[in-house]
Image: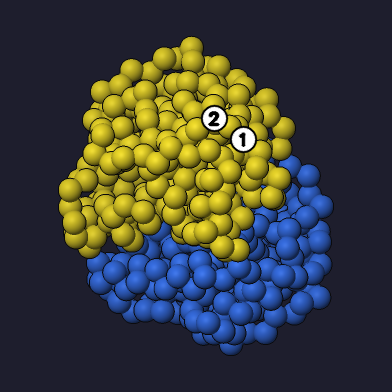
Chain colours: A blue, B yellow
Amino acid sequence: MKKIPVLEIFGPTIQGEGMVIGQKTMFVRTGGCDYRCSWCDSAFTWDGSQKAAVMDAASIVEKLYEKGTNLFSHVTISGGNPAIHPGIHSLIEELRNQGIQTAVETQGSIWAEWMIDIDEVTISPKPPSSLMKTDWEKLDYYINRLERRPNKAFSLKIVIFNKEDLEYAAEVHTRYPNAPMFLQVGNDDLTEKEAGMLRDHLLERYEWLISETMDDARWNDVKILPQLHTLLWGNKQGV
Amino acid sequence: MKKIPVLEIFGPTIQGEGMVIGQKTMFVRTGGCDYRCSWCDSAFTWDGSQKAAVMDAASIVEKLYEKGTNLFSHVTISGGNPAIHPGIHSLIEELRNQGIQTAVETQGSIWAEWMIDIDEVTISPKPPSSLMKTDWEKLDYYINRLERRPNKAFSLKIVIFNKEDLEYAAEVHTRYPNAPMFLQVGNDDLTEKEAGMLRDHLLERYEWLISETMDDARWNDVKILPQLHTLLWGNKQGV
């Protein structure tokens, strides 16, 4: 069995963002990323500050049951960029065999064939503030493959810090008009320890994002969301 | 054309709750309700404190364009209980002819044939804290009709104030296992004028609801959400 570097397995908790916001789920956070986003809220997955446990699919499933017991039917795979790990294929199969739904989030830079079997795929291309560059051909391929899956869902989700990010998101939205589109408020204060302070600040940023998009006809069909876990628990890891 | 009593037409803003949370939308709030929920956050639709404008579908559409100009492609009909107004049929038709998506929220106590044509139907049966009684036969009929619609979405959404409400919600969830299920934190302070105070209180209540459901296997497949508009704007009407 191919091994997967794992930084965190936790839950059950709620999914705080994106297309299945509010969903009760377990999280598996994999290590390693082909990106280095300037504002990454999970930089510990690639900056060497935390050590990954190298696990095969069977031990990940075992750990999920150890932590989640019978209290889950949904697993979210996040990163880093999970798409770089072929071993996730076996994990998805194992979970599906046990009737467990799966979700994944990736930036859409590296295709993984196991994406086809995931119930909810979130593609989150990174806007200019990340300092990363989008490979549009790779993203085209992703969207094209995902659009052809029967009975499975996918969406685009773009984190917005400023007006330039919003222009980038508009370009993505124009390029893939049929893909459900989510805009998410960027968390620009990853060091604030006090959840209450961060909360007020992020809701102000959320209000800004709402007012920008309400006045723009390019954003008539969009969902605009905050990160609920950050409003609740601030920058705390593992919730 | 059949007339509809209208309390508010506003937007574009975001849908703050439920199955299309975050969606950019216009709101049409109708007057009149067969229920009198103890904690109703829109009691002005039925308690006589605000006067409804009696409008036909064409004038509602006109007003939507007056307020929303070209800045919308989605309209949410809320109440009160919109299901008591047969005139909404023409409104839905008119909006559909213009390529506008529609959503509605009702408690599921009175069937309206025009429900069939709505893109996203939210059924929100009222738990014991509302002091209302559920007519299960009527609710069965609702769910049954909605489940048979092709290419349209619906969900159950139950507002939770206490453990008894949660038991009621579990009963609903068991009765309709295939209906997507949303639990929403009840707003138990409708008089607080300061959005910041209300925000902290409601996020505490949200955390309570999350912890209750995380530890209960009956809630493995559920989405648990706050009201985003209340976190942002408190008890303010028309946002």
Quick check: A35 above or below B145?
below
Residue B68 spot, x, y in % from top left: 53, 60
| SS under mark 2 | loop
- Picture quarter containing residue A101? top right
B128, A55: nearer the viewer: B128
B22, A133: nearer the viewer: B22
Q: Residues within 10 Å of mark 2 (few under 14, many from 20)?
A: some
Q: In the shown orientation, is residue A165 left or right of residue B195?
A: right
| Chain letter of the residue carrying label 1 | B
Q: Amino acid at mark 1?
A: Ser
Residue B209 spot, x, y in % from top left: 32, 42
Q: Which residue is mark 1?
A: B90
Tell me which label, 1 or 2, sits earlier in the chain.
2
Contact between labelled residues 2 and 1, with CB atoms less than 8 Å apart: yes
Q: Which residue is mark 2?
A: B2
Q: Is residue B196 visible?
A: yes
Q: In the shown orientation, is residue A221 left or right of residue B140?
A: right
